[in-house]
Amino acid sequence: MPQEVRGVVAHKKGDPVSVETIVIPDPGPGEAVVAVQACGVCHTDLHYREGGINDEFPFLLGHEAAGIVEAVGEGVTDVAPGDFVILNWRAVCGNCRACRRGEPWYCFTTHNAAQKMTLTSGQELSAALGIGAFVEKTLVHAGQCTKVNPAAKPEVAGLLGCGVMAGIGAAINTGKVGRGDSIAVIGCGGVGNAAIAGARLAGASTIIAVDIDDTKLAWAKDFGATHTINSREQDAVEGVQALTDGNGANVVVDAVGRPETFTQAFYARDLAGTVVLVGVPTPDMRVELPLLDVFGRGGATKSSWYGDCLPSRDFPMLIDLHLQGRLPLEKFVSETIGLDDVEAAFHKMHKGEVLRSVVVF
């Protein structure tokens, strides 16, 4: 039978969110109902509320989550009731041209639940990133559930569902940072600091954090930055070059996603180095670069969606590294809150006061 639970809904662009009763249908073929244990408050949820993703209101917000599988539909074999899972928004299809050529992290036909969750009025909800996890229970495609070691705390594990995975993957999967490499990370919020943590994990020798906020630069040191640059006080490109024998970094990650920071990243990399754009720009943004510089500097400029991750491969591995004490995921959790506190958490996040507020059920 369908279940009624509490969840956070955005009804109208820019309006404060509200906690309402959500109807969760029984799982159909290929679907799963997950009892959410924790869900991080991510910038993407705020973008949904502000109409920055699309205008398919009302939205059931939340997507960076972990929980326990409660029920599965017909044909589901990879997860079962009782499994501890992290939810992901890139459930690969296995059949598209990207999957067939062995690059499933670029999957062009990712899965979501076929059924819709609704309000008690019957109005259908658009689940944020196909998940909708600011809710006591949610309905997802079973491929969006990745089983991991249940020894990990839910409020920590769920962060791999979006921002932390995006940052770690931008450094390791997309940027291919390796032992002895140098990396600069522009923007030291949750994603940027995750890139720093990933670079440290990969063995980078020089890890340069760039931001305009000294508090965020202090966070970056805690995650493994060897040097910091406040770009309000020092030119970011010159600063990175000075710390890399005048050459620039092997990899530069733009975790902000603005024309100014992308240009900084482009010129702060070494010749034949790699620029990784993981910060999300808005549709109106444009970058202008001399084509001769694009040609003459060589190397690569890449975008990184979800850290080019493969959840079935990366989530269990990163949780194991965390449990071994090698990946301090707990440092990303600034506070734990309840469902009624999501709107206040958006304001804290917008002001840069927290790395992650996490809703705990």
Image (spheres, rainbow, N blue to C red):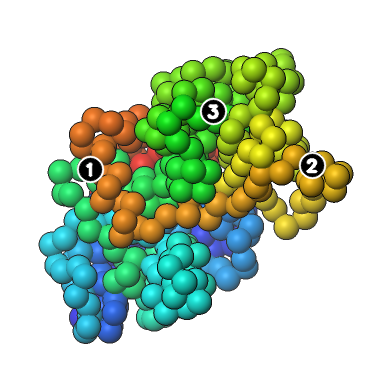
Amino acid type at circle 3 is Ser
Which of the two marks, 3 or 1, is nearer to us in this view? Answer: 3
Q: Quadrant of residue 328?
A: top left
Estimate how packed mark 3 is, as few (under 14), some (14 to 19) or many (20 or more) residues with alpha carbons within 10 Å.
many
What is the distance, in whole Å, between disc 1 and disc 2 at their CAs? 42 Å
Instruction: Name the residue: 50% across, 30% down.
Output: 181
Estimate how packed mark 1 is, as few (under 14), some (14 to 19) or many (20 or more) residues with alpha carbons within 10 Å.
some
What residue is shown with label 2? Answer: 296
What residue is shown with label 1? Answer: 320
Q: Are marks 3 and 1 in contact (CB under 8 Å)?
A: no
- The label on residue 182 is 3
Which of the two marks, 1 or 2, is nearer to us in this view? Answer: 2
Looking at the image, residue 112 sits to the left or right of residue 234; the answer is left
In the picture, the quarter occupied by the N terminus is bottom left
> Can you say whether 239 is above or below 137 in the image?
above
> Can you say whether 311 is above or below 28 in the image?
above
What is the distance, in whole Å, between disc 2 and disc 3 at their CAs? 21 Å
Looking at the image, residue 237 sits to the left or right of residue 337; the answer is right
Q: In the image as oriented, which residue stretches furthest toward the left?
A: 82
Could you tell me which secondary element the residue under label 3 belongs to? strand
For marks 1 and 2, the one nearer the N-term is: 2
Which of the two marks, 2 or 3, is nearer to us in this view? Answer: 2
What is the distance, in whole Å, between disc 3 and disc 1 at their CAs? 26 Å
